Image (cartoon, rainbow, N blue to C red):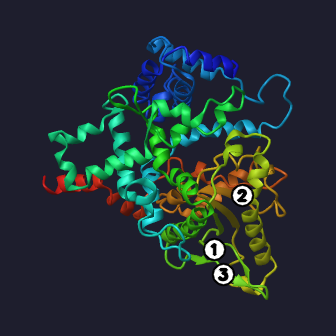
Amino acid sequence: MRDEEFIARVRRHKPSALLPLIARFASTRMQPDDWMKEGQRGLGSPWALAEIARVCLAYGNQHRKDATFADLVACNDAYNELDDPEMVEGFNGLVAGFFLRISEQLEYQLPLRHEMTRAIALFNYTEPKRPLRVIRNGWDTELLGADLVTFIAAGEMLHIAAKPNQGRFNPKWLDQPNFSFLRDVTDPDLLRAAWTRSYVIDASEFAAQNGRPRPSVWRRYGHNPLLSRPAVSGLHEDWLIPVPALVVRRLSPLGLYYAGIKRWDKAFADDLGDLFEPYIGSHLRLLGPDVVEPGFRYGRDNHETVDFIATLPEVVVLVEVKSVRPTAPVRAGNEHAQAELKRMLNKGVEQLERADRLIDEHHPAFAHIPRDRPRVGLLVTLEDFHVLNSAFHRPLLDRERPDFPIGVTSAGEVEHWVTVKDLAPGQVILDARAEQEEYPWPMGAGVALKQQLYGRKHRRNPIIDHAWSVGPWQQLAALRSRDG
């Protein structure tokens, strides 16, 4: 199906009829098992509903006809039939771009607790590498309309309310007697301020602010404005939440990154980098005392080594931290994706390979690093790059030492790796390394850590637990538990 046909199918229906159906259906599809049921695979997936909602708001108008659930299913089917830009008859290029595009689906399958909590742990409880420029006292209220904890709580409340209320929410509910408990743990006026500033957009403003991109095979891979404002007003007496998962994306560090860049440009990105490196360091130190060494300078020219070196009984792990996230070309898997990946990640790869080479060469600055065990490099990024450790994608990065295994690993993977309790963390790394070595590729071995974490048992992550505990809903649960 061509994009023009998909848009035409969606815009048959007026937004005030179709969007409530989307929100209601999405509220029943909030877990991966919900949209992967036998016989219903792909029906009501959040990425499909998010695109249908975007087209409905951007291209629809109120002079169209009503919609039924059957119409929504037809729109979902039309989305699933859309042509991929490259996977068409006669295409003989690499399939790397295709897998970059479909990795968007993996964003909706990440652990909710960590995704909802990471921003508080990162911004509120991490000691920065150096003095910050714009992330200072009051930055969060200036940017978000409320302090960070309240901003996160406001998003959590929308997400929690979606399922029992069929994808709807109304701020007037806070005035009802059954919500009187709120003032014990938070300020309802600050919740309203956060919603207004950061979560809600009026339907009439959606197209005016975001335009109507011309139909093309690439259009749907562009930025969905619902990522920035995941609740919609003006079509129903209540706010509509077309895809609850987009609320989680909004309150995550990724959502904060884009808001901060829009407000403060590069200064915010620099501050985030100065927080992200020590944030990862604090997690690595959960591996145990005297395991992790911070980066150091060496040689006449005062070169920097990697950010951290973790010496485990089974393996030495060289860690380089980059506060990067997939950009639009990478998410689209288009012709600019490889250049973008190299721009963001090649420097980190070079630093890891240089450290590995200097250890091999017995450089005096690295003489204390054991040489009696394997070494692995981890390039830790703020957000998931999902498929970059596959054989299809390893050639996208430049490698001088292809025999040295390097894995592109997200913050979320590190948060879970350091708490594995049914297997030594070093063995988890070795298993990831061994699995990749079974499928050699001439451009260098990768280390897919995520696959080794599936099904593992974990102890609680104290950094995430602490950040989680300061939220008002967690405080309320603690109060109620204490009071019996």
Quadrant including the N terminus:
top right
Please provide percent x and percent y for residue 320: 66, 67
Left or right: 123 in relation to 472:
right
| Residue plotted at (65% across, 20% down) | 81
> Do the residues bearing badges 3 and 2 touch, measured as CB atoms within 8 Å?
no
Please provide percent x and percent y for residue 309: 63, 73
Q: Earlier in the sequence, mark 1 or mark 3?
A: 3
Please provide percent x and percent y for residue 124: 42, 66
Q: Which residue is mark 3?
A: 296
Mark 2 vs mark 1, CA separation in Å: 21 Å
Count neighbours of disc 3 (C-alpha within 10 A) and say few if under 14, some if 14 to 19, many if 20 or more: some
Count neighbours of disc 2 (C-alpha within 10 A) and say few if under 14, some if 14 to 19, many if 20 or more: some
Q: How many marks?
A: 3
Count neighbours of disc 1 (C-alpha within 10 A) and say few if under 14, some if 14 to 19, many if 20 or more: many
Q: Nearer the viewer, residue 144 or 440?
A: 144
Q: Earlier in the sequence, mark 3 or mark 2?
A: 3
Left or right: 111 in relation to 92:
left
Q: Secondary structure at mark 3?
A: loop
Q: Which residue is mark 2?
A: 344
Q: Amino acid at mark 2?
A: Met
Left or right: 306 in relation to 140:
right
Q: Secondary structure at mark 1?
A: strand
Q: Which residue is mark 1?
A: 309
Foreground label between 2 and 1: 2
Q: Earlier in the sequence, mark 2 or mark 1?
A: 1
Q: Nearer the viewer, residue 208 or 167?
A: 208
Q: Amino acid at mark 3?
A: Phe
Q: Amino acid at mark 1?
A: Ile
